[in-house]
Amino acid sequence: MAVVKVYSTPTCPWCVRAKQYLSSKNIAYTDINVAVDRNAAMEMVRKSGQQGVPVIEIDGNIIVGFDQGRIDSLLGIS
Amino acid sequence: MLQLKMAKQETKTAEKYFDLVIIGGGPAGLTAGIYAGRARLKTVIIEEMIAGGQSATTELLENYPGFKDGVGGVELAMAMEEQAKRFGTEVIYDRVASVKLSGDEKEVRLANSVIKAKAVIIASGASPRRINAEGADKFHGKGISYCATCDGALFRDKRIVIVGAGNSAIEEGIFMQRFTGDITFVQDLPYLTAEKILQERIKSHPQTKFYLGTLIKSINGTDRVESVTLKVAKDGSEMTIPADGVFVYIGYTPKTDFLKDEVKLNGQGYIITDEDLKTNIDGVYAAGDVRVKEFRQVITAAADGAVAAHSVEKYLENK
């Protein structure tokens, strides 16, 4: 099973949408709240080069924003 | 031969039929959904993000009547969504690929399905206008953000520039004060445009800096934002100030790309409607921030939603 992480903040609508989408496809994920976890925030910026959420990591592949097409292709959702 | 034909039918895109399809689940679309549901129209709302749309990025709405201490943008949107569903309106989370609006049967194409309906309300809203300055594309997401509520926490104790000084800019500036005290506003006009109460609040923090009558010339850095070069409108003089983050609130762009040429728009791309919120096409209405209007607020969007749903009801009665 794919290892999925969602770097998010609680006040970001696209983060909510990304998590709702993963749940609707029965994909288990770890939600990392970068608003409270500063180390995770730094890790997200280092991995993605991004200072904006959501950042989604699927088996080491980084997706910036809610890019449904890339999420689907990395998870094999048709 | 017969087998082949059957297989073809199975892969055909799913079609669903409704009286009314509402494009956009912000305050306008959700309110239209409430009224249409109560009018017993078979109604579906298509939303690409989450209920509330842009209003869901507002931390606290203080001017929506009925909530004396304010109400969270997400909280209000969720309540509106539940209210619409209670009256039978469906909500689908998907992106609209294209539309066919002329004729009696309207079509809204999603990724894997087609919605067919007798009437359409376009309530797709608007998205933040991108800043046009050198470095704007290079540093998008690398220090430039259009949503402080989303990304603000990533700029704790950093130096922040906020572009614009309208309601959204000042509200987000007040939100950012919980993360950093180093906030500079840059506004092209020589005065603040936000509500007076917001101006009073932001000015009560004496460390907040304002550059009015000033433009952003460039956003500079190596891998991420390090500084911003400003240009004074009056005399053209320039100065560069250090900055780690740039939050942009310089107005909106209507989300009307998917409409192609069918619906009549004004020069800025907003939908032109009459008093009943009808567009140039029979059975097609527009509500909320996406249409030509003077004052774009949650309450004026909600009011539009009610009017548009009522117009649809009358239109369908006369069909």
Image (cartoon, coloured by chain):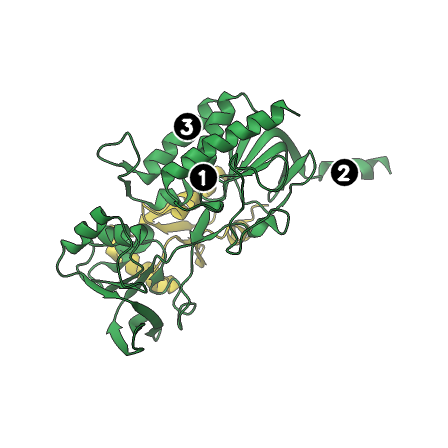
Mark 2 falls within which chain?
A: B
x and y percent of residue B9 in the render? 75, 36
The green chain is: B
Q: What whole-number distance in Å separates the C-alpha atoms at marks 3 and 1?
A: 20 Å
For the residues carrying marks 2 and 3, which lies nearer the camera in this image? 3
Mark 1 falls within which chain?
A: A
Q: Which residue is mark 1?
A: A23
Mark 3 surroundings within 10 Å by alpha-carbon count, few (fewer than 14), some (14 through 19), many (20 or more)? some
Q: What whole-number distance in Å separates the C-alpha atoms at marks 2 and 3?
A: 39 Å
Mark 1 surroundings within 10 Å by alpha-carbon count, few (fewer than 14), some (14 through 19), many (20 or more)? few
Q: Which residue is mark 2?
A: B7
Mark 2 surroundings within 10 Å by alpha-carbon count, few (fewer than 14), some (14 through 19), many (20 or more)? few
Q: Colour of chain A?
A: yellow
Outermost right residue: B1
Q: Residue at x 76, y 38 (%)?
A: B7
Amino acid type assigned to the residue bearing label 1 in the image: Ser
> Disc 1 on helix, strand or loop?
helix
Q: Residue at x 82, y 36 (%)?
A: B3
- B219 above or below B271? below
> Disc 3 on helix, strand or loop?
helix
Nearest the viewer among A61 and B34 is: B34
Q: In the rendered structure, find residue B82 and report the number of the disc placed on it.
A: 3
For the residues carrying marks 3 and 1, which lies nearer the camera in this image? 3
